[in-house]
């Protein structure tokens, strides 16, 4: 909240309080204080949730991550750590619906969502070293690296992120030249 917003809020509160009795003013101020405490607790919980998300991603894949698609796993871990926050509160932290939380309960979802950026990163590295390497060979090379995770996508699912990132090999089309022009074929 900016300083001007705070001043205008104070002026508005003073105007609202002017016509009320002392007891009503105290009750209203206590309600505002309670709401402020509630918002502060929610922000603390949000910060803890983000820290948990980052720690989980860094431990699992040994990479630094700020925001990934692991909000559901983070919410589940927070529920296990402390049962106080309700699912509604945890979903509100990440701004997702209840349906989206329960929609995909696949245990490998975290690994599947996190492995795609790693695959694309490795593909970019190989493309820099070998720009003419085809997708089929690139798939075989990367499959050897990530096959043990159990989350390696199939060939077609592997190619889609490469296509989206522009990592496909461009087909070189030959230009066809005419050896005889129509001007030289005129009859005298």
Image (cartoon, grey):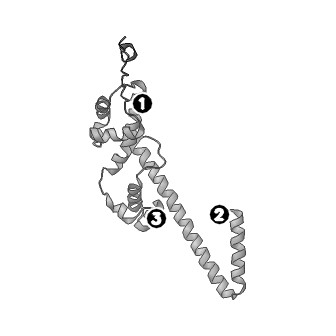
* Mark 2 → mark 1, Cα distance in angstroms: 44 Å
Position of residue 46 in the picture relative to residue 119 (left or right): right
Where, by quadrant of the figure, is residue 166 drawn? top left
Sort mark 2 into few (<14), some (14-19) or many (20+) by Cα contacts within 10 Å: few
Q: Where's the C terminus, which quadrant?
A: top left
Q: Secondary structure at mark 3?
A: helix
Q: Secondary structure at mark 2?
A: loop
**Residue at label 3?**
92
Where, by quadrant of the figure, is residue 121 drawn? top left
Going from N to C along the chain, the mark reached first, 1 or 3, is 3
Q: Do the numbered discs 1 and 3 sit on residues whose CB atoms are within 8 Å?
A: no
* Front one among 140 and 110: 140
Q: Nearer the viewer, mark 1 or mark 3?
A: 1
Label placed on residue 1? 2
Q: Position of residue 187 (x, y in %)?
A: 35, 13
Q: Secondary structure at mark 1?
A: helix
**Residue at label 1?**
125
Q: Position of residue 87 (x, y in %)?
A: 40, 66
Position of residue 29 in the picture relative to residue 45 (left or right): right
Q: Position of residue 165 (x, y in %)?
A: 42, 39
> What's the residue at 54%, 62% (across, down)?
43
Name of the residue lying farthest toward the front: 188
């Amino acid at each position: 909240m900016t300083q001007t917003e705070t001043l205008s809020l104070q002026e508005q509160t003073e105007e609202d309080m002017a016509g009320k009795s002392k007891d009503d003013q105290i009750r209203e101020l206590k309600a505002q204080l309670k709401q402020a405490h509630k918002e502060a607790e929610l922000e603390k919980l949000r910060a803890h949730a983000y820290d948990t998300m980052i720690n989980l991603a860094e431990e699992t894949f040994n990479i630094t991550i700020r925001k990934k698609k692991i909000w559901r796993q983070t919410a589940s871990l927070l529920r296990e750590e402390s049962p106080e926050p309700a699912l509604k509160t945890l979903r509100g932290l990440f701004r997702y619906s209840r349906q989206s939380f329960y929609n995909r309960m696949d245990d490998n979802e975290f690994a599947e969502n996190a492995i795609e950026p790693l695959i694309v990163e490795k593909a970019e590295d190989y493309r820099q070293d070998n720009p003419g390497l085809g997708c089929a060979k690139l798939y075989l090379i990367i499959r050897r690296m990530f096959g043990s995770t159990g989350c390696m996508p199939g060939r077609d699912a592997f190619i889609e992120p490469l296509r989206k990132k522009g990592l496909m090999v461009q087909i070189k089309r030959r230009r066809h030249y005419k050896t005889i022009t129509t001007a030289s074929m005129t009859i005298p």
